[in-house]
Image: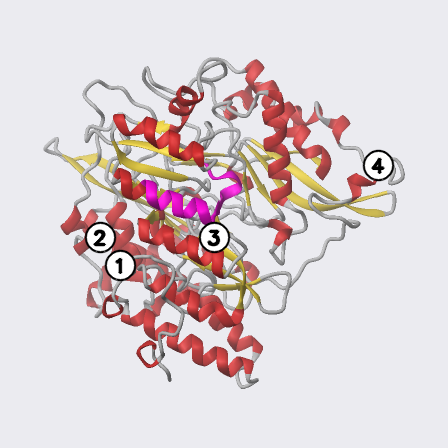
Amino acid sequence: MTTLDDRPDSDLWPGHGIDVLPRDRWDRDQLADIAKFRDQLAGYLAGEVTEDVFRVFRLTNGIYGQRQGGTNQMVRVKVPYGSMTPEQLDMMGYIADRYSRGWGHITTRQNLQFHFIDLVDVPDVMEHLASVGLTSREACGDTVRNIQGCHLAGACPQEVLDITHWAEAAYQHFVRNPLGQRLPRKFKINFSGCATDCGQAMFNDAGVIAVSRAGSDGAVERGFRVYIAGGLGATPHPALALEEFTTRDELLPTIESILRVFDQAGNRDNKLRARMKWLVDTLGIDEVRRRVLATRKLLVASSSWPGGIPTEVLEHGDEPAGVADDGDVTRIGQGIDREGPASTPVSIGGLTPYVRWYHVNVVRGAANGSVSAYAHAELGDITADQFRALASIQRDLGAGVRLTNRQNVVFRDLTDDQLPRLFERLAGIGMAQPGAELARDVVACPGADTCNLAVTQSRGLAKAIAERLEEEGLAEVGGVRINISGCTNSCGQHHAADIGFFGAERRAGGRSAPGYQMLLGGYVGQEQIHFGDKALRLPAKNAAEGAVRVIRRFTAERTAGETFRSWLDRVGGAQAVGAGLRELDVFPAFAADPDFYTDYGEAGPYTAEIGESECAT
């Protein structure tokens, strides 16, 4: 087996000008992964490694096939809890330019994806990632996926604990852990620092929310509430509480015990029923709970017992940011009502660009004095030049950076006097639009652009909705979020959005046509989740108009501080609102308007082409 040290430098490293880690500081396990990938790739290309074997191997290493087939690959980069350094951002720009199509994509799980990378270039890309402390290991496949965490952890005025280093500890413990290499199916772990649940614990296999409880002596103890068996997909399932309170020293043993029970009892015969949610459906929550707690009790005997406060937490702490003395609080959470005099207004029209941006993109009020601000990445896309510019901004401001699960970038650890400069520089690269995380910020999966399972161009619809919102002056409406998936599998998390769409093939006049199912009223927060209810089906080319009409009605009828879900319940629910849109569910004759039979961005007639699933979420 060749190793990195055996390979000549050639032209792989000179020229990119990025301050990478010295090779003796690269993760040695990662180097072994890369060397093994080179050997397996060589065997595959020589016909010595079968397609099925190589497919499982590359997926475990975060390399995913595209619908274009051939040697086109998507490389998914794990970014634990979304945290990035300037060197990592610079490297993303380099990879986008040299190996991909000039831009990368933020996912709803805080990963980064690069498409159209040639299979033979993948080992070099993996080396570039290693040089800045990133990996694609276990970003795909039947493994423990990227550890997600609230992007405002350590800066949020509502948090009970700063979950940053808990998420880091979980990442370090589970990456390459033998327990997580050949699971029945993928396993997702999320962390939130408070009940606002920006980390979206309520629809994951193991969701962790920081909570507190009062002891008999009146002292307050901070710890966690762990939820299990949540999931989206074609059959969404709300996460269920494992126990009322999990202590800090038992958190990692609890997560490992959940994983062990899933590994032992998960369905290995039917992939469609192999997630944690189906285990609860089969055994019942009481039996799953009993097995997890029994496993945890005996886990101390394991040679890899992860109990106690993790080293990362002991070294860096987990104290919450706290609320500022003046009580001035703003937040951009999961649709929760805003508080305080600086809260987000319902409408921000008529203000200067900077003031508009400040009102809805800046989060402040923490006792530690930190200020955070969002940079808007349209459709979650970041060009190579934007990556490099973000790195430069991060260096110059001495800020932290995290990717959000709504596909944006948040700068943290800022001061008030840095905000005008940040706005100016973001404006210069097209990332200063106000309303990041609000109506303008439409979230979409990659869709039929690259995914084998998608039946519609979800990104095209997202762009069309954003354009219509701009035209109608509704792009900066607060309290409403739109998510789109190109199929029922909910990679775009359509179930959890105020307005959700998933793609579906329609038939009209004997022809196939692109369409969407609209859902209304999805909500995550306050340790609750409501999945969106079906409103109506729409032709793809009428879906944007449908979204605009719903938002227009919501803004006209909402009361002060009323959430979208509360408004929806008050006016009769999703079907009642959908009934008012029935005129949009009409396909004109093909001769009258052939555009309705062509998907966004496509030149020819629509066809629903579905390839073999490689578990893209």
Q: Secondary structure at mark 2?
A: helix
> Disc 2 designates what residue?
250
Residue 123, compared with residue 590, is above or below; it is: below
Give the camera-side residue of 267 and 325. 325
Q: Residue furthest front?
A: 15
Magenta portion: prevailing SS class: helix
- Is 213 on the left or on the right of 447, as rendered? left
Q: Is residue 490 left or right of residue 242?
A: right
Q: Residues within 10 Å of mark 2 (few under 14, many from 20)?
A: some
Task: Residue 378: say if magenta.
Answer: yes
Mark toward the start of the polypeptide (3 vs 2)? 2
Q: Residue at x 12, y 33 (%)?
A: 219
Q: Please, what is the three-letter code of the amino acid marked with disc 1?
A: Arg
- Dot 1 corresponds to which residue? 296
Q: Quick one: label 1 or label 4, which is nearer the N terminus?
A: 1
Are circles 1 and 2 on residues that touch, CB within 8 Å? yes
Closer to the camera, 117 or 596? Answer: 117
> Dividing the picture into quarters, in which one does residue 534 lie?
top right
* Separation of marks 2 and 4 at Cα, in angstroms: 62 Å
Mark found first going from the N terminus, 1 or 2:
2
- Dot 4: what SS? loop
Q: Amino acid at mark 3?
A: Lys
Residue at image mark 3: 277
Nearer the camera: disc 1 or disc 4: 4
Q: Which residue is mark 4?
A: 593
Observer-nearest of 166 and 406: 406
- Residue extent of the magenta highlight: 376-393
